[in-house]
Amino acid sequence: MQLTNRSQAVDRRPMNFMERLYVPAIAKGMAITLRHLFKKKPTINYPEVTREFSPVFRGLHVLNRDEQGRERCTACGLCAVACPAEAITMEAAERLPGEENLYREEKYAARYEINMLRCIFCGLCEEACPKDAIYLSETFAPANYQRKGFVYGKDELLIPNPVTDPEGYAKARGPQGKK
Amino acid sequence: MNMNLFLLAVDWPFLIEKAVLISAIIGISLVIAMYETYAERKVAGWIQDRRGPNRAGPFGILQPLADGIKLFMKEEIIPNTSNKMLFILGPGLAMLTAMMTSAVIPWGGNVEIAGRSVSLQVADINIGILFVFGVVSMGVYGIMIGGWASNNKFSLMAALRGASQVISYELPMGLSLISLLMLTGSLSLRTIVEQQMDGWYNVLWQPLGFFIFLVCAFAECNRTPFDLPEAESELNFGYHQEYSSMKLGFFLFAEYINMFISSVIMATLFFGGYDIPFVNDRSLAEAWGGNAVALLQIASLLLKTFFFIFVFMWVRWTIPRFRYDQLMNLGWKKLIPLSLANMIITAVVILWLKK
């Protein structure tokens, strides 16, 4: 069955005189390599230059804070329900009096873990969150020697406080500045 | 008393001049060989749409240094079953013969230093090319001894391949040179260059001879498409296989020096040597002074050389390796008859023109 009309029968005839000279074919090949010598190289000099991500790139998760630096997450568990890879676990806790500057709502996530080995970076958690507390940033998980190193807790996920550390906050938000 | 008279009789400035010249030439060939490895990797990269080494220093120019340090630091291994003396002699011989050829090459005209006219050639012997041939054919001993002493089947096969290849390709190389020598009537490299300074370059009279010489030079230097003695994919790097550290480095280095020297010889024999193209060197020397022109001549010879080195690399990264029977067919059944025909035609034309 013929799939495409690009296929060619292998030519098994003995080489003719011009082909046995080798030189024309070699000259042709050398012209090709000379052309490649001056071609633009597609390599990106990685540590100095980084490839730009597409605007819809989904990388590591970030747990967001509001303008006053309070955690937005209320530990409702919708993200964990939405997660097709079951990568998210959390434990809720009640906000105590005097912690109003730390947590925005009366309930917060005392423990919030994402297993980056399970996560498929689909972004459904971001879509499920009613409080805009989680979004996917433009970084990706660095290599690690241990499996447990890929279970990211709150200390890794939480964005720096915009009140006390505005620089770190801006950096973590990234150039696209998702909300 | 006698000793003093002897010391007085020695021409000290001459000795010093030659010593300086020899060390300069050896130093320069080593540095050029070093940077050939860098250039080779760069050219390979560019031809394959890569960037080549660019991490060590700006544009990676410290890469050969890093490679050299790496080779020096490697553990030196001499196999138990090898013949130790020959094992060490192999790379030494390869290096020695590679360096010896540069003695008869005229690198430029004469320079005036402190009232002395210094010739930029270590030895202007009247059998220049013959000397080059003799030394180059000794180069195969490096490969053979190295391959034999390794006591390894792959190495031995590679050594045999290398020996038969170099010997087969020396014949058409010599035959193609004979037709050139019929034109020049001299074996001295300086005379050949001086003849070309006044007239046309020899490549215009001997294009076929040059082509055969070029192909044979590839084979003599064991470069692709004739790198059967190395053949990393079938013979595991051939006669290099048991070598490590700087002994391996010597083999690799000798190959690059050979490449440099054969490029210089091609430039000298066929492309006017140190003659500056499109310019009358003698009138230029009167206008600018001999020393400036001598420097320009060295630069011009090196430029021609670098072009040929580039051709070596260009060919290496274009053409795959020949099969062994193809190699022998090409050498014995094509190049030798072709160079014989070239020789006869040249002889007939010269006789006919002289009549």
Image: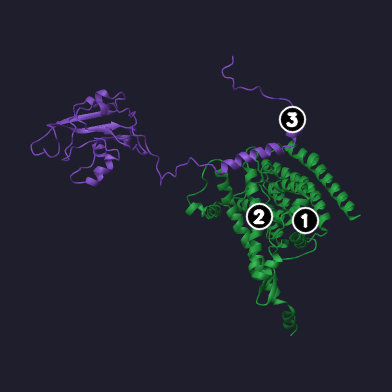
On residue B134, the disc is 1
Three-letter amino acid code of the residue under disc 1 = Gly
Residue B79 position within the rendered picture, expressed as x and y whole percent measured from the top left: 63, 48
Secondary structure under tag 1 reads: helix
Q: Nearer the viewer, residue B53 or A76?
A: B53
Mark 1 surroundings within 10 Å by alpha-carbon count, few (fewer than 14), some (14 through 19), many (20 or more): few
Distance of mark 3 from mark 1, alpha carbons? 38 Å
Task: Return the residue found at the far right.
Answer: B355
Chain letter behind tag 3: A
Where does label 3 land, which residue? A15
Judging by colour alone, the chain drawn in green in this rendered image is B
Residue B305 disc label: 2
Q: Secondary structure at mark 3?
A: loop
- Tell me, by letter, which chain the rendering colours purple: A
* Contact flag, marks 3 and 1 (Cβ < 8 Å): no
Quadrant where the C terminus of chain A is found in the figure? top left
The reply to whether residue B299 is visible in this rendering is yes
Is the N terminus of chain A in the top left, top right, bottom left or bottom right quadrant?
Answer: top right
Question: Which residue occupies the extreme top position in the image?
Answer: A1
Query: Alpha carbon of mark 1 to alpha carbon of mark 2: how far?
Result: 22 Å
Q: Same chain for marks 3 and 1?
A: no
Asked whether, in this view, residue A131 is left or right of residue B274, the answer is left
